[in-house]
Image: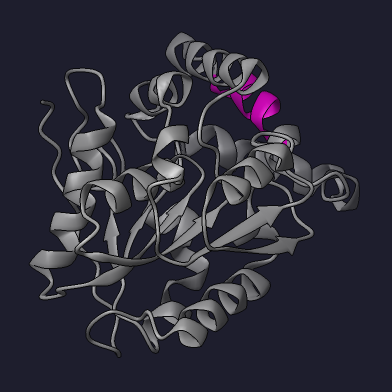
Amino acid sequence: MPIAHGAGGGIAANYGPILAGLAATHTVVGVDLPGAGETPRADAPLELDHLADQLIAAGVAEGLATFAVSGYSLGSAIAIRAATRHPERVTALVLTAPFAHADHRLRLAARVWRGLYESGDRATLAAYLTPLALGPAAPAALSPEELAALLRMTSETPPPGTPEHTELVERLDVRADLTAIEVPALVVSTTGDRLVEPNHHRDVAAGLRDARVVELDTGHLPFAERPAEWQTAIVDFLDGIGAAGGITGGRREASSRHTSG
């Protein structure tokens, strides 16, 4: 199962807490976007079609003929586009905190995110993103020391490709792709999400022909707040539809190198 991560993240950052659990029964192929993980940063704006093609190519390179595709946040749009460009390969979709098109609020949030990153003021970037990314109850549960540690970690982790990732968030549009997808899909809605708000998740599910919605009481970071529940939702869905797609068993990750086109 090829997996695509979110803007300003990476496979390890976004899927790390559940990778071992997923790979216990499914082959997992992690694809880091340009400027994340070991993948070099792009020297031109990212193209959704190219990222979708690389996601599929990563699965094929691991010996898989057909497979489910998983995407988180920005990665969900990549997964959706992959399903429409390669319907002969994709047997199911797993979409977590998805959006098909950025509304004004999300577009402006991405623009501020990019501007703060490019300014070099990582402390303010962390202070901006943290209350958007966490569920409403999560910050209140932290001690001042824990909050300070979280802000420090958040300020240190954005990958170099963050500007290109967030720029793509602003302009992508896969709304027309949704009605062309015939395979079953799981939409994991993070109900306390203040970054990609639940109306986006509902719109994606409504646009798909065969979508199952699972709600998680978490902010935009299910891997931080509800990893066990997130993993269970994905595994149960894949097992239920028989969409493991290929080899089961041990974990295999592949980083994809991006060439702008």
Q: Could you tell me which residue is drawn at 19 percent across and 26 percent down? A: 42
Is 253 inside the magenta-drawn segment?
no
User: 26 and 250: which one is in front?
Assistant: 26
Looking at the figure, which quarter contains the N terminus? Answer: bottom left
Visible residue check, residue 126: yes
Considering the whole magenta stretch, tell me its main secondary structure.
helix
Q: Is residue 76 above or below residue 122?
A: below
Visible residue check, residue 1: no
Q: Could you tell me which residue is drawn at 88 percent across and 49 percent down? A: 137
| Quadrant of res 186 | bottom right
User: 28 and 214: which one is in front?
Assistant: 214
In the rendered structure, the answer to whether residue 168 lies left or right of residue 145 reads left
Q: Could you tell me which residue is drawn at 39 percent across and 40 percent down? A: 177
User: 230 and 64: which one is in front?
Assistant: 64
Q: Is residue 22 above or below residue 115?
A: below
Q: Is residue 147 above or below residue 102?
A: below
| Quadrant of res 252 | bottom left
Q: Position of residue 223 (x, y in %)?
A: 59, 60
Q: Position of residue 165 (x, y in %)?
A: 38, 29
Q: Which residues are magenta?
A: 122-130
Is 128 inside the magenta-drawn segment?
yes
In the rendered structure, the answer to whether residue 99 lies left or right of residue 56 reads right
